[in-house]
Amino acid sequence: MADAAAISGEEKEEDGAKKAASTAAGPAETLGFYERSDSRRPEGKKRNLSDLSLFRFIGAELTRGYFLEHNEAKYKERRERVYTCLRIPRELEKLMFFGFFLCLDAFLYVFTLLPLRVLLAFVRFVTLPCCGLSGGRVLQPAQVCDILKGVILVICYFMMHYVDYSMMYHLIRGQSVIKLYIIYNMLEVADRLFSSFGQDILDALYWTATEPKERKRAHLGVIPHFFMAVLYVFLHAILILVQATTLNVAFNSHNKSLLTIMMSNNFVEIKGSVFKKFEKNNLFQMSNSDIKERFTNYVLLLIVCLRNMEQFSWNPDHLWVLFPDVCMVIASEIAVDVVKHAFITKFNDITADVYSEYRASLAFELVSSRQKNAYTDYSDSVSRRMGFIPLPLAVLLIRVVTSSVKVQGVLAYTCVVLFYFGLITLKVLNSIVLLGKSCQYVKDAKMEEKLFQPPPTCTPGKTPKKASSKNKSNQGTPADDNISASVTSQPARQNSTAPLLTQSSSDQFLTTPDGEEKAITQDNPDVQPKSANKDLLDIDRFTICGNRID
């Protein structure tokens, strides 16, 4: 017991000496002591030494390292997104360039080949007693449609003479800037609505006038449909005229504030589109709408330049005054489209190669419309695909040109004839180049087999025998999915040159045959698709013009 007491006394003396030494020692020794003593403490009871380890923390922050290769897949994905954004302007402008010439081809058709086709149809109608009937028809369906287009064009042109452009210009110019901004936005919305419903009116007229006589006719008649078509073209032409007049007022304003506000309206479109969910088919619809909008804006700028040049007696110097504003409007339109498509593809993980698929689908439309068994005219095909209806725009342009350019004398009429032949030459060359490039795009996309497959023949409301024998389990599908025999049907319907394609998922290549999904639906008849993800060839302007996302 005495030995134990002596040992405990010695330990107490040593602890006392240590405490005295630590009191006399410097901060470094004290820090080491507290670190050693805190290491024995529980984790929640350790002392806070942040004030004492500040320099150590700063040193660790300055020398700390990390290794990016530990998350290699993530950084590769980020790099690919950057490369995709860099490729978007080039791929998008390729599609826009091709689509612009498609619209130009359909637009030039109204001025060049349509008058000649109407003349040939009229000659056939006059010489009919000498030639006799062929197949029980007075005129072929295509000739009837051409005559209707020509008559609508002439009637609406004469009706436009009763619209006073000068009064409209001064009426719009007297409004405030904010009113004109609201008016321009309303006109853009109305233009989309008119385009969406206008082609339906024209298609209804064409089908009513060419429907076979042996079928039961459940319609109003050709005359009411004709008057509806004339009224539509006239109202749509006035709407575009108001748009052009508002743009002209913006160009002629002194402070250019209205033009700046109208250009900034394009950037508002980014906000309404970028943060929405898009699939490949939805992006295809938006791309077609952008092509149509860009071509229409170019025609509006041409009308504005013609009206301004007329007011300044065709002085070439004034053209250079308008040139900076025209370039500014075009540049803003291109910039908005590039930014919009770049962020849409980024947020929805869509590659830049999708624009090549879109271009191949548009090329397929052009090539299929040139075949012998084509179901519609090419200009109508562009109207359904992009929502671009050339008749109202052509009526307005003819009205503006005839009122701006005075033709007097033999020399002037000779120039008009030469200009007309120049337009025909431009139309023919443009069609030849487009057809050649389209064949190349279709071949690169491996879609040639779709061109040579014969269209299915069936009566309205009935599915083809081949399709019904393969898909017996789908007998309970709704009647809306049945194939119609309309002349104005879409490419994937009855008189289409493309085969009937099954529905494909959004992450599948959109222009390739969906053979794998056909096999899945045959093996599992109970599996029904939830939503109709259409192939690119099935998309028409019913959803394009309104820019609606399903």
Image (spheres, rainbow, N blue to C red):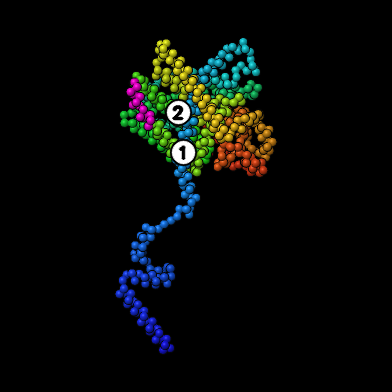
Of circles 1 and 2, the one toward us is 1
Q: In which quarter of the image is residue 259?
A: top left
Residue 193 in picture, x, y percent from top left: 48, 31
Which is nearer the eye, 33 or 489? 33
Who's the residue at 33% across and 23% down the image?
A: 317
The stretch of residues the image draws in magenta is 315-328
Quadrant where the N terminus is found in the figure: bottom left
Q: Which of marks 1 and 2 is nearer the N terminus?
A: 1
Indicate the secondary structure of the residue bearing disc 2: helix
Question: Where residue 478 sits in the image (x, y, percent)?
Answer: 63, 36
**Residue 516 sits above or below residue 222 on the image:** below
Q: Is residue 372 magenta?
A: no
Using the image as rendered, state which of residue 362 and residue 550 is in the foreground: 362
Instruction: Determine which residue is flagged by label 2.
Output: 296
* Residue assigned mark 1: 88
Residue 79 lies, with reference to residue 403, above or below; the image says below
| Magenta-colored segment: predominant secondary structure | helix
Residue at (44, 13) in percent of width and height: 414
> Decide: marks 1, 2 in contact (CB < 8 A)?
no
Side of 538 where 341 appears, left or right: left
Q: In this view, does 457 lie to the left or right of 279?
A: right
Q: Where is residue 361 in the image (x, y as percent from the top left)?
A: 54, 33
Residue at screen point 63% across, 15% down: 133
At x 68%, y 37%, the residue is 470
Q: Which of 247 and 479 is in front in this view?
A: 247
Specify whether residue 447 is in view.
yes
Residue type at mark 1: give it.
Ile
Q: Give how far across and how far down residue 52 sits, in percent.
A: 34, 65
Q: Mark 2 Cα within 10 Å, few/some/many (few <14, many 20+)?
A: some
Q: Residue 19 carries which label?
A: none
